[in-house]
Image: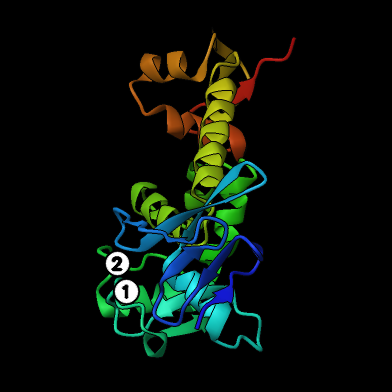
Amino acid sequence: MFIDIKGFEGLYSISPCGEIRSIYRKTHLKGWTEKVGYRAVSLWKDGQQHRRTVHSLLAEAFIPNPLNLPEVNHKDGVKLNNSLGNLEWVSGSGNIRHAFSSGLAKYSPIIDYEKVPDILQEVLAGIPLRDIASRENLSETSTLRKLLKREAIRTGQLEAFQKGAKAANRNLVQERSQPIVQKTLTGSTVQNHVSINEAARTIDCNPAAIFKALKYARPYRGYTWERQHA
């Protein structure tokens, strides 16, 4: 039994076992296995290509979702087991929690699962990961980035995540390129610097340390730091 795929009615249909058929061409789509382990297919509509995972299409077609949950989980943790009995609708945080408990995620949880979807939206809006990590008391950003990337892949927002991260990095570079003033704790000017990076080289420190001192208006290495306004 094939039924039309939601959003692609009259174009593609899907069976309970995950076979996907082009209605116009009367052929079955082969699809592929992604690097992250899920089966996926490309669906075309109005000249636009849409990548969709098979397990998500199955759930949308055959599994009720009365709570309007956003994601689909493989109960046994096997990403290629797309039998309907192995799929369930879950929240974003529930899916991440299951990934860690089943061993699908390689990294230990470093942050409250419930925050991950909201943090992803912050990155999509261009907020630097470094700022988020500082707020959440994380010592580095690499693990958080991997966790958010996994969430972006799972929710079909990978491209937006990558664009948001790049935009945030550009903003950070621009901020670090602004002239700053190094002062004593009593307010006397010690030196003008053309950028945060130059100031960091002068006192032999990580530029991020001066960036934080500027952001939170706090001393660092016995000096205060101010942006130089034109």
User: As rendered, which of 13 and 163 lies closer to the eye?
Assistant: 13
The C terminus sits in image quarter:
top right
Relative vertical location of residue 172 with respect to residue 90 in this rendering, above or below: above
Query: Where residue 55 sits in the image (x, y, percent)?
Result: 43, 72
Density class for disc 1 (Cα within 10 Å; few <14, some 14-19, many ≥20) is some
Query: Where residue 226 sits in the image (x, y, percent)?
Result: 63, 23
Picture disc at residue 100: 1
Rendered residue at 64%/21% (across/down): 227
Q: Judge whether residue 219 can be spotted in this image.
A: no
Query: Where residue 85 sits in the image (x, y, percent)?
Result: 39, 90
Rendered residue at 51%/55% (across/down): 25
Q: Quadrant of residue 33?
A: bottom left
Name the amino acid, label 1. Answer: Phe
- Count of labels shown? 2
Mark 2, residue position: 105
**35 sits to left or right of 74:** left
Density class for disc 2 (Cα within 10 Å; few <14, some 14-19, many ≥20) is some
Q: Judge whether residue 146 can be spotted in this image.
A: yes
Under circle 1, the secondary element is: helix
Work out whether mark 1 precedes mark 2 in sequence or the reverse, and give the earlier one: 1
Query: Where residue 80 sits in the image (x, y, percent)?
Result: 29, 71
Q: Quadrant of residue 214?
A: top right
Name the amino acid, label 2. Answer: Ala
CB of mark 1 within 8 Å of CB of mark 2? yes
